[in-house]
Amino acid sequence: MKIKNDKIIIQVICALVAVVLWVLVMIDKNPMGEKPFYKIPVTIKNIEALTKGSTSYMLMENKDSFTVNVKVKGLYNDLLKLQAKDIKATAEITDFKEGLNSLVVEVEVPNNDMKVDLITPKNITCTIDKIVSVSVDVLVQYQGVQASGFYLEYGASNPDSVIVKGPRSIVNSVSSAVAVVNVEGMQENVIQNKPVVLYDNTNKEIDTKFLTISPSSVEASYEILPTKTVPVKPVFTGEPAEGYKLTDLAIDMKSVEIAAPKEILDTIVELETEPIDITDTDLNVMSEKKIVTGKNVKIVGKTNKANVTATIEKIVEKEFIFDFSDIEFANKGDDYTITPIEEDQKVTVTIKATSTIMNKINKENLKLVVDLMDSVEGLNEILLNITTDSEIESLTSDTEYIKFNLEKSKVE
């Protein structure tokens, strides 16, 4: 009995030794090792969590763009069979916030005898934005040049605004919504259906792949009006101080180009300024005044104002004394002689004029005339006519009639 038991023990020991020897041989032929894998795609899980009731969020990065590098440990033969497609990397969206978020990466391998030794990066960083909507006014711009002699009025759109919807960070960068109309060679109003293009505050076009624009196009229009050039007339109100006169009303914009519908344009021959007030002034007045256009009339150019200058001058008085010999006797026959009744007869003429005019007046500018058409031989008293070619305010004389003798010359 003892011999039989000893035989069994010996057999068990031999089996154990055989197993150990087999394991040692197998380890020697299939050792432990490690293998790196690069750019393993990371699957983002729980994307549906980005919608909370009526509020939606968006993952700003492409969900298929995340990758990690991993290092796997295991038996040589197992590692030899392992491929990148067998490795599963995931990152789950759980408790997120708007802005930057860090998601933990988890990696699984198909063989339980292998293990993931290293993951880089351990976390992926992503941006999550809230979906918002804003109303943006549409700015209508033009390209090209309208026909010569026509004016391009400001553009308009229908509707005049659009709704931009998308991630907050992109929507907040929208500075303007623009529709462009082609006006090349146009002579009449233009209406075109044009797409809306979004720009940021640096005038750079915004990529709208994450945005929706409603509506995406608008009816954009430009009014094109005929033009013509008309004179501008300065206007004043009031009267200067007593003893002074308005002598000139000047404007630095003699004419202006205007645009209007043809039926209105044809009726306009000139435009006036707003009146410049010279009430009770004794000095020159200069003021910038608006050019009055009326309804539906546009001034072509950068300004609709002109500088108006009112020149105010003092009225002065001056006397001129004439001798009898300075008087011209019209219609006098050659055979008649004229002699004054009074010896050393004088005529005093008083003139009132502005100082500028008065400085140019002398005796040569005055003409004293007596018409002898109705005269008789002998004593005559005929009206004295005084004229001048100067622009004066008034002219008076201390002598109204000239007394003289008209005698026929003696023939020797």
Image (cartoon, grey):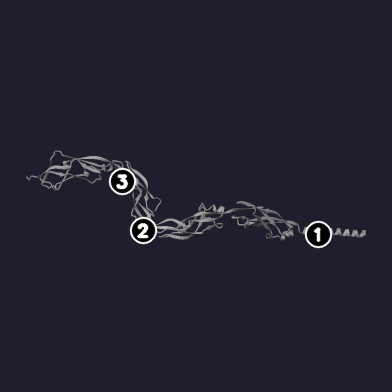
User: Of discs 2 and 3, which sits in the foreground?
Assistant: 2
253 vs 210, left or right, is: left
Above or below — where is 344 with respect to 291? above
Question: To which residue does mark 3 refer?
Answer: 248
Question: To which residue does mark 2 refer?
Answer: 263
Which one is earlier in the sequence, the residue at label 1 or at label 2?
Answer: 1
180 or 79, which is in the foreground?
A: 180
For the view shown, which residue lies furthest in the front direction? 53
271 vs 363, left or right, is: right
Q: Is residue 144 visible?
A: no
Q: Residue 151 at what x, y percent from top left? A: 40, 56
Secondary structure category for the residue under label 2:
helix
Counting every numbered tag in the picture gives 3
Give the residue type that dot 1 points to. Answer: Trp
Q: Residue 362 at what x, y percent from top left? A: 23, 42
User: Of discs 1 and 2, which sits in the foreground?
Assistant: 2
